[in-house]
Each structure stands twice: as structure tokens, then as C-alpha cells.
Amino acid sequence: MKKVSKVKLVKKSAAGKRAGGTRAAGKRAAGKSWAEKMNHPPKPEVKTLTRPKGANFPAGKMLIPTPKLIDETVRKIRKGKTRTVVEIREELAKRYRADYTCPLTTGIFLRVVAENAEEQREQGAARITPYWRVLQKGGALNQKFPGGVAAQARKLKAEGVVLTR
């Protein structure tokens, strides 16, 4: 007999949207604040994969970073400069003597860092982590950052970064 997983049904309004409306871009769902998410997990960890687990997870030593580690690395990027997420992952792997850094957690934690920075800005912080200086693989802008690619482009242009297509 085939095993079927349970699915949670979401009620939809007459307009076909989820009940309760949609949340604005960059706003978190109820639960932990972005600042609270910065503290979990507490320490980076190097795991050894004895077998590959897909194309992005080859066998070898894989660093699982933390949001704070990503934040610390992004804060080192100077005004007017950019780094790709791939460069950041390579730097962290080298620092922790791993073969590579987990691409999945790096992306998730980079988003946490960006959202936390905007949360701090809203609370009046004078300096925040310059997450907009991080580009995707190949130099593309990151649509998952607060405000999307338009906001990232504005911030980079304000720092003198020349954007090309």
C-alpha cells in the first residue's frame, strides 16, 4: 500500500487568496524576530559527508555556517565593493578547513542577515550590515533581499557601483 503524507488545507477567501491576507515583502510571519534568528544555530559546524547527497552536496567536509558568521563576513565588504555569495562560501570553507560551505544554509542565513539589517534600520540603527553588497552567482542582483533587485540596485548605485546587464 502506498504511503500518503498528510497535507494541511488552507482556507481561501472568495478572491482565492489565503485567509488572513498576504504579508508584505520583507515582513516576517508571526514568531521569532530576525534578530532572534541571528542566534540560531549558535556555532558553525563542519560535517563530513561520506557520500554525495545531490549535485550541491558532494562527499567531503561541508561547513554549515551561522547567521552571525555570514553577518561578520558581509560587514567586511567595503563601501563601493561587492562579493558574490560563491566567494563568501569559498572564503568561509577555507577559514574552517572545509571542502565547501553549504549553499542552502548560506542562502537562508544571508536572507536572515538582510532582514535583520532592515529591522535594525527601522529601529533607528545608524549602521547596519551592508547585505546589498552581496551578489548572486555570476554577479546577479538578489531578488530575495528586502525591496528586491530595485532596492539593491539603488543602494549599490548610491555607493558608486556601476551596474551592467
Image (cartoon, helix red, strand yellow):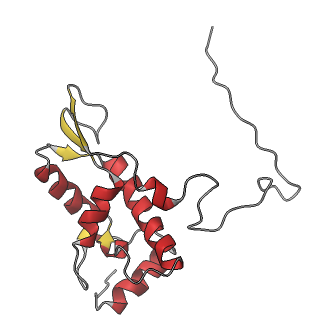
Quarter location, residue 156: bottom left
Quarter location, residue 129: bottom left
- For this view, does 88 lie left or right of residue 155? left
Picture residue at 71% right of the left edge, 35% below the top: 8
- For this view, does 111 lie left or right of residue 78? right
Residue 99, above or below 112: above
Whether residue 86 is visible here, answered yes or no, is yes
Picture residue at 35% right of the left edge, 55% below the top: 67
Q: Work out which quarter of the rendered image holds the N terminus and state it.
A: top right
Quarter location, residue 117: bottom left
Question: How far across and down, in percent of the image, does residue 110 sit?
Answer: 37, 60
Whether residue 137 is visible here, answered yes or no, is no
- For this view, does 44 lie left or right of residue 128? left
Question: How far across and down, in percent of the image, does residue 83 sit?
Answer: 23, 70
Question: How far across and down, in percent of the image, does residue 101 sit?
Answer: 23, 47
Q: Work out which quarter of the rendered image holds the C terminus and state it.
A: bottom left
Residue 28, above or below 147: above
Q: Nearer the viewer, residue 162 or 85?
A: 85
Picture residue at 40% right of the left edge, 63% below the top: 113
Question: How far across and down, in percent of the image, does residue 149 sit?
Answer: 45, 75
Residue 98, above or below 72: above
Q: Count of labels shown?
A: 0
- For this view, does 133 lie left or right of residue 151? left
